[in-house]
Amino acid sequence: MLVTVAEAVLAVLSGSAGQDAALATVVGRTGSAPQALGAKLLLFRDGRMIGTVGGGAIEAQVLDACHEALRDGQCRTLQAHLVRDLAMCCGGSMEVFVEYLQPQARLVLIGGGHVAQALAPIAITVGFRVHVIEDREELLEHPAFQAAQRLAYDVDELDGALDDVCEHDFVVITTRDHARDELALAWFLERPHRYLGMIGSKRKVHAILGRIVNKQQQLGRPLPDLRRIHAPIGLALGGRTPAEIAISVVAELIAERHGGSGSSMNIVEKIMQTLAATGASPQPE
């Protein structure tokens, strides 16, 4: 049972709380405000609340701000003079910072080879919780996976390895052979996820998807939604080493997480076109 705000915040960020939340923190006070600097209140999406920023009218206003943060995912600052603005008997003022908290996205790496070893540290650096699934336990001891959760399972044991896979998960399949990639891909196609990617050449992708479709047809099952798959994985950066491939994959994951296009942000050519057409200095848009 969670008893402190700190424990609850960790549960939200780790994903164990199963929902997002809004955290309010007293960051400024004058006079006889009802709470000290640093006092916190955490509001879960399901309405549960832990902690307090003082009760009364100020807490009601803070809770309204927390609900707004849960609706739009944005942080905000609330300032209130307790007498003038809220008609409270306290003679001071308070400033409260409200931030939106959501679970740190989980990246599941199926396979622990060279690309996964290059990928894991970069993914951790940009904020993913990395889980590595690999049946060769010696690979799980690689230093690249020290900050990841390591699970010694083969691809035909995914039911035991991932009983909590959900629509927020990012999945990258990089096993040591095509048969394992195919098994893993078919397994995840029947389950929720945010991103599902598989490494390989275009020929490999055609072959594996063809076999998956044929098997489904032979069994008389509906065809899986292949649009959910990213294969080959990564943005077209032109790199070929494991580190370069890892960077291209993480770039694609970031684009998926934030809704980016993955295209170049270079505007110099557009500026040059404006100069050539008008002779005038370009103005910021």
Image (cartoon, rainbow, N blue to C red):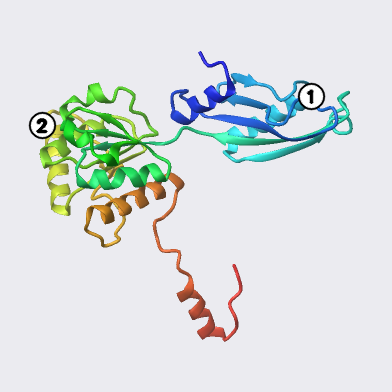
Q: Tell me the amino acid under the disc marked 2.
A: Gln
107, 30: nearer the viewer? 30
Q: Identify the residue at horizontal 44%, vertical 35% (top origin).
A: 104
Q: Tell me the amino acid under the disc marked 1.
A: Pro
Q: Toward which corner of the image does residue 182 lie, by quadrant?
A: top left
154, 70: nearer the viewer? 154
222, 284: nearer the viewer? 284
105, 71: nearer the viewer? 105
Q: Identify the residue at horizontal 22%, vertical 56% (top origin).
A: 241
In the shown orientation, is residue 195 left or right of residue 54? left
Residue contact between numbered discs 2 and 1, judged by CB atoms under 8 Å:
no
Q: Quadrant of the C terminus?
A: bottom right
Q: CA distance from mark 2 to mark 1?
A: 69 Å
Residue farthest along the top direction in this orientation: 1
Label 2 vs 1, first from the N-terminus? 1
Mark 2, secondary structure of its residue: helix
Q: Nearer the viewer, mark 2 or mark 1?
A: 1
Q: Position of residue 146 (x, y in %)?
A: 31, 36
Q: Position of residue 160 (x, y in %)?
A: 24, 21
In the rendering, which numbered label is found on residue 34? 1
Q: 143 above or below 18?
A: below
Q: Position of residue 278 (x, y in %)?
A: 56, 84
**Does the image show residue 223?**
no
Q: Toward which corner of the image does residue 66 lie, by quadrant?
A: top right
**Does the image show residue 89?**
yes
In the rendering, which numbered label is found on residue 218? 2
In the shown orientation, is residue 214 left or right of residue 78? left
Q: 166 above or below 231?
A: above
Q: Position of residue 259 (x, y in %)?
A: 45, 48
Q: 201 above or below 238?
A: above
- Mark 2 nearby-residue class (10 Å; few <14, some 14–19, many ≥20): few
Mark 1, secondary structure of its residue: loop
